[in-house]
Image: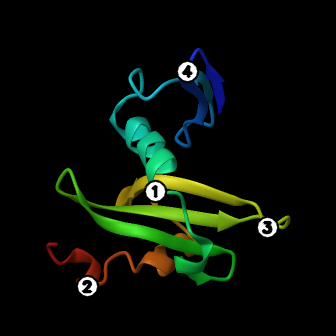
Amino acid sequence: MIERKGTRHYTMRDLRNGSLVQNVTRSSARKLWRYAITEHETAPVDAEKIAWKGNLGVWKQGRRQGRMRYDLVQRDIEGKLHIYYGVSDDGIDGPWRELVGVGDSETEAPA
């Protein structure tokens, strides 16, 4: 994040294709990135409140836009947290699926 003239500018990574998009502001961001920026600014991740399984964790989960969405966290070997906001069931694979219980009746139940 860089602040210029009172406006915060972020570099966002699109995990679908790996590209970096620079100079994203809250007002210029698309819905998912606006959500990520707003959460980052107003509700920072508290590592003590994450449901951890190894170096992977679930910060928040709930229904948004009619689908289950997860805010996921990964701790790298240096202890830095990487947050993935608004991940849908179809965006989850590998060990993340077990972590969030994709396909479990509890996950599928309406909120």
Label 3 packing within 10 angstroms: few (<14), some (14-19), many (20+): few
The three-letter code of the residue at mark 4 reads: Gly
The three-letter code of the residue at mark 2 reads: Glu
What residue lies at 28% left-to-right and 78% top-to-bottom?
Answer: 107
In the image, residue 19 above or below residue 108: above
Q: Secondary structure at mark 4?
A: loop
Q: Which residue is mark 4?
A: 6
Q: Are marks 1 and 4 in contact (CB under 8 Å)?
A: no
Depth check, mark 3 against mark 4: the one in front is 4
Q: Which residue is mark 3?
A: 79
Q: Are marks 1 and 2 in contact (CB under 8 Å)?
A: no
* Label 3 or label 2, whichever comes before in sequence order: 3
Q: Which residue is mark 1?
A: 43
Label 2 packing within 10 angstroms: few (<14), some (14-19), many (20+): few
What residue lies at 63% left-to-right and 25% top-to-bottom?
Answer: 3
Q: Which residue is mark 2?
A: 106
Q: Position of residue 64 (x, y in %)?
A: 24, 55
Q: Nearer the viewer, residue 17 or 64?
A: 64
Distance from Cα at disc 3 to Cα at disc 2 = 31 Å
Q: Are marks 3 and 4 in contact (CB under 8 Å)?
A: no
